[in-house]
Amino acid sequence: MSEGGLNAALEAIREDVKARFEAQKRVLSFREYLALVQENPRRYTRDAARYLKDCMDRFGSYEVETPAGSLKRWKVFDLELGRENSGHQAELKLRDRLAGHEATQEAFYRILDGFEREGRANRLILLHGPNGSAKSTFVACLMRGLEAYSDDDEGALYRFSWIFPRSREGGGIGFTTAADELGSTDSFAHLPEERIIAKLQSSVREHPLLLLPRDVRQKLIAGAYEAARVPEAAPDWVWTGQLARKNQQIFQALLTAYRGDLERVLAHIQVERFYISRRYRVGAVTIGPQMSVDASERQITADRSIESLPASLSALTLFEPYGELVDASGGIVEFSDLLKRPLEAWKYLLLAIENGEVSLQMSNLPINAVMVASSNELHLSAFRQHPEYNSFRGRIVRIRMGYLLDVHREREIYDGQIVPQIPKHVAPHTTYLASLWAVMTRLRRPDASRFADSEVGTIVASLTPLEKADLLTEGTVPARFDADQAKILAGAIPEVELEAATVSDYEGISGASPREIRMLLLDAAASYEEPCVSPVTLLSRMAEFCERDDYEFLKAQPDGPYRDHRAFVEQVRERWLDIVEAELRAASGLIDEQSPLTLFDRYVTHVSHWVKKERVFNPVTGQDEEPDVDLMSGVEKSLDADDAQAFRNELLGAVAAWAIDHPEQDVDYESLFPHFIDQLRRAYFDERRTQIGEIGGAIVSLIQDDDDLDDAMREAAQQALQVLVGVYGYERSSAKVALGALVDERYQD
């Protein structure tokens, strides 16, 4: 680029930055800020709790359908923050978003709503759960949301500074001289930098309205709220709040010097927009479990940079607060692993939560931040035995965050965080199998006595870990139940999900954490001799992992079929082979999955006419014919129906009952008779089993460049492989591993 072109580009950038600066109202006088308050009083008088709640509302929410019902999910936890969706940003969203935990989001939002009604954040929110249950991710998403929201016009935040200008003669200001230079509506807020001799910021980021006397401020806010028809009351932060010690000292000194002229005092105020930032610890701060004080004070009048202040101010001993609680003002502060600290190190929070202030050496520090803490269950259990626990109980609101019990939500973690970091192909279903095993390790054996309906309790208590995982993830009812039992179980899914929610050993408190699963996946990816990350390698690593004795959940004794983590590896392997077999059937083109359903529909039609002694219309011949006895007998043989007469009557009775419950709807045989349809599918598949196995073996030979295949089998294998690659996401390497395992396991007669 030529020098002229470069200068033009820089000038365009300069103009763009300047225009944005002006549009964002970055620097205002106090009078200009008051105009904003009058225009939108609720927006510009929010405390941290209302600001965080508005942030969640700003990015919106949507409904998530689960087997247990509909749940609300907030987009801030998806990191859908309205920013540019570049490839890198999309990857960050996928990696850092919160998977699942909609119930936790709902509970947190309700707490914020309570803070709004009570006027301030008057309790500490404690997220508790096992290590690796996404407590930190939950808070990190909120912090990212606050960062994006503060960039938005709707989320504009302001703090104030004291501005002291040079006199015309170039020295430090004298109050009379400075006042004479001002008109009745002027302010030092917009003075150029060279005219400013000193600038003192409010480190606590106090609300600019706190500069007004309380009675005047309350009258102004009440009038603005009434004019704007704001239904709720103003938060305590601006309604009854006071300036911190340093700003109060400066305010009083100037008020005395100006003989009570408030307008001249406020002429020294520069209102400046600020932005939430985790990196720079502005309104978003995480405090680790180290033993240290979270706030303190330091003297600032010893700083030679402000020696040029007027005598009335330089004579003051000014202190300003600093520390994590100060940095978090206006946003959110996270006390990570709070209960790892000795109680004495954070006992100050007892009064801080109660009064909204922290007592420092020279003053009280007002707190305007939503305080969120995290803890694992072990430390929480110990804390609940402490004599001081009762003092904190009313000041802490607990939200449980256990491990996920939904396989698909668990899978989101690894698809977003691990798969993008692996430089080679990850075979289909690898992360699904890892997630399924993880969820199975977390499940508890159902206790029939916890269900009000004994029949429900009996059915639920018979569920295996794999069946329970499928039920909680997809609402799949095991085919072994009859129609009545299936209906009862389907209606009881919310009860199954909440069964162990009130006990200390709740589902999700233990088992494999996402951290262990990440380790297993990365370990499987480290096998350099393997061309892809395959379920075979992963299952091998799982089996080895189960032999370790340094994880508490692996030491637990099996409880019937539950907590048998070694057995789960084999069950997960069988599930994988089932999936691969179904994909091979579909890819081969030999199996029509709808044929068994069509056959059952014909069977019911013929049985219905047989019972009524009516003829059946044959669409092929166009004639009414007698019901096909051979068809009915063949289906009944496949379904193991010993008493044909009783079987037919029972089946028609179930169809009639369904029709009464679902008028004007076609009968859904797959949901009404899942066990029968499954049996027919298996019988239909068994008739073609040999051909399916031959195609599977041919695909493996094709990938290995085997020249012994005849032309017909080669063509069939090529077509099936194209489907596996194009539809199911395989590569040749992963297809070889999957089909090789399937053929070896199930087709070697």
Image (tube, grey):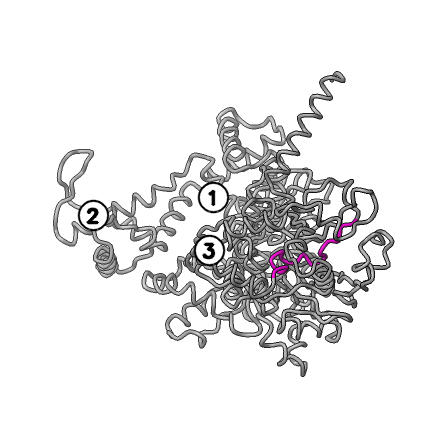
Quadrant containing the N terminus is top right
Residue 592 x/y as whole percent: 38, 39
Magenta stretch, residue numbers: 198-212
Q: Earlier in the sequence, mark 1 or mark 2?
A: 1
Q: Which mark is residue 606?
A: 2
Q: Earlier in the sequence, mark 2 or mark 3?
A: 3
What is the spatial separation of the Cα atoms under label 1 and label 3, in whole angstroms? 34 Å
Within 10 Å of the Cα at label 2, are there few (<14), some (14-19), or many (20+) other Cα atoms? many
Residue 735 sits in quarter: top right
User: The residue tagged with tag 1: helix, strand or loop?
Assistant: helix
- The residue where tag 3 is placed is 72
User: The residue tagged with tag 2: helix, strand or loop?
Assistant: helix
- The residue where tag 1 is placed is 582
**At 21% from the left edge and 53% from the top edge, which residue is drawn?**
663
Type of amino acid at the residue the image marks with label 3: Lys
Type of amino acid at the residue the image marks with label 1: Ala
Q: Earlier in the sequence, mark 1 or mark 3?
A: 3
Type of amino acid at the residue the image marks with label 2: His
